[in-house]
Image (cartoon, rainbow, N blue to C red):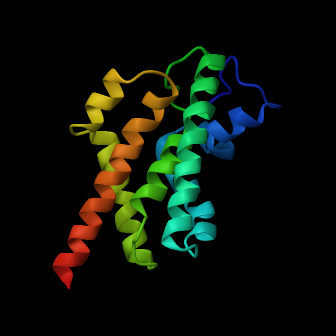
């Protein structure tokens, strides 16, 4: 993906919104953003559950502003290169997931599937909610749904 009009190479918000460059992936920038989100996840996975949630909540609140401002600067509501929402959605999907490659891969695949297919209420949020909140909300819901499915699978397996 080429650098869109309105993107500033010196604007830190733009780099955050584009997932430190993951959003420039020519194929599947959302998937690239979800993969890159695993790197900071390796830093927060060791936090207590409360601190993990606090980090995710702060990233969500900041993301509403980061994504909304970047979308305004680009002149496009939800530019495909904006992937900070995938970061937050992935971190939600990974909450309480056992720290194994298999479960992390399951969370990744479920999150991507839900984000791409957009079942209700994800599709509703994607179509009806505007601005930075709208950019973030569909991925937050996909993350919550993925996390709930994984937790249900963990309960059923025990």
**Residue, far top:** 75
| Front one among 99 and 33 | 99
Which of the 4 image quarters holds residue 105? bottom left
Residue in view at x 64 percent, y 69 percent:
43
Does residue 33 show up?
Answer: no
Residue 150 appears at what percent x and percent y? 28, 67
Is 55 left, or right, of 10 in this rendering? left
Residue 25 appears at what percent x and percent y? 58, 41
Does residue 20 show up?
Answer: yes
Which of the 4 image quarters holds residue 96? bottom left
**Residue, far right:** 10
Residue in view at x 38 percent, y 75 percent:
102
Residue in view at x 22 percent, y 40 percent:
119
Residue 44 appears at what percent x and percent y? 59, 67
Is 88 left, or right, of 137 in this rendering? right
Is 75 above or below relative to 35? above
Which of the 4 image quarters holds residue 8? top right
| Front one among 19 and 44 | 44
């Amino acid at each position: 993906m080429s650098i869109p009009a309105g993107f500033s190479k010196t604007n830190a918000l733009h780099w955050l919104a584009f997932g430190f460059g993951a959003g420039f992936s020519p194929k599947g920038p959302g998937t690239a953003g979800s993969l890159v989100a695993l790197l900071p996840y390796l830093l927060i996975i060791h936090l207590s559950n409360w601190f993990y949630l606090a980090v995710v909540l702060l990233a969500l609140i900041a993301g509403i502003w980061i994504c909304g401002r970047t979308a305004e600067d680009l002149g496009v509501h939800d530019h495909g290169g904006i992937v900070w929402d995938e970061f937050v959605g992935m971190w939600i999907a990974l909450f309480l997931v056992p720290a194994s490659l298999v479960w992390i891969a399951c969370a990744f695949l479920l999150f991507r599937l839900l984000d791409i297919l957009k079942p209700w209420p994800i599709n509703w949020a994607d179509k009806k909610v505007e601005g930075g909140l709208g950019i973030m909300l569909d991925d937050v819901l996909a993350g919550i749904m993925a996390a709930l499915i994984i937790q249900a699978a963990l309960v059923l397996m025990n």
